[in-house]
């Protein structure tokens, strides 16, 4: 077995250093996700379901303001017999979400926590109502799913398109 020579060791270290630099340059940086692709006006329709099994169709408008790590949400949905008017303020820190929500028609409010990715928002809702909310989106459409606990409203599903 030949001894490892210092010149060969330096050459091997240089090759590893070059490879490490190439891997670093070729790896895309993982920037924190932002709310920017949601900003603007959206409209669409959906359905809400009650615990007793009844359901009703909804027409909805949603408005997203802010940008970067801050998002303001205003959603108005109307059905034949009911109306939903929800507002929320969200902040993202590295994709971890926190904020508040309020539903103005029924005077309920609380806190939200969750996760933001480039294609979805997943929230846990607490306060006057417990439940979850998921918004799956791209630049032109989004699907919203809300599930609640402990109240007559069981779920809301809405599909929205950019206005």
Image (cartoon, rainbow, N blue to C red):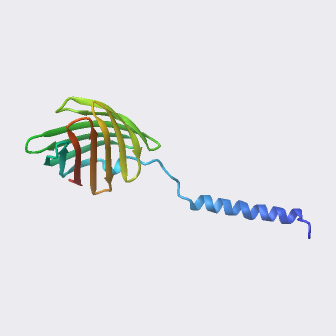
Q: Position of residue 35 (x, y in %)?
A: 36, 46
Eyeballing the image, is 67 above or below 14?
above
Residue at the limit of the structure toward the front, as seen here? 52
Viewer-closest of 21 and 42: 42
Say which residue appears at 18% left-offset and 31% top-offset: 106
The answer to whether 30 appears left or right of 23 in the picture is left
The residue most toward the bottom is: 1
- Specify the farthest residue to the left: 80
Q: Nearer the viewer, residue 138 or 147?
A: 147
Q: Which residue is outermost to the right? A: 2
Q: Residue at x 36, y 34 (%)?
A: 99
Q: Position of residue 82 (x, y in %)?
A: 12, 40
Which residue is rendered at x = 22% and y = 45% of the image?
62
| Res. 138 image quadrant | bottom left
Q: Quadrant of residue 126?
A: top left
The mark tally for this picture is: 0
Q: Quadrant of the N terminus?
A: bottom right
Q: Residue at x 53, y 58 (%)?
A: 28
Residue 137: where, in percent of width, then height? 32, 54
Question: Percent x, y for residue 139?
Answer: 31, 56
27 or 149, which is in the foreground? 149
């Amino acid at each position: 077995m030949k001894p490892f020579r210092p010149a060969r060791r330096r050459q091997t270290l240089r090759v590893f250093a070059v490879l490490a630099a190439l891997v670093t340059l070729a790896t895309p940086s993982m920037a924190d996700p932002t709310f920017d692709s949601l900003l603007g006006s959206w409209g669409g329709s959906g359905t809400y379901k009650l615990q007793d099994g009844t359901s009703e169709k909804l027409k909805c408008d949603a408005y997203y303001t802010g940008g970067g790590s801050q998002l303001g949400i205003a959603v108005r949905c109307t059905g034949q017999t009911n109306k939903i008017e929800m507002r929320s303020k969200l902040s993202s820190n590295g994709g971890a979400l926190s904020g508040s929500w309020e539903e103005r028609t029924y005077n309920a409010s609380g806190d939200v926590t969750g996760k933001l990715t480039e294609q979805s928002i997943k929230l846990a809702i607490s306060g006057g109502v417990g439940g979850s909310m998921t918004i799956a989106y791209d630049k032109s459409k989004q699907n919203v799913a809300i599930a609640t606990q402990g109240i007559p409203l069981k779920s809301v599903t809405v599909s929205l398109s950019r206005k």
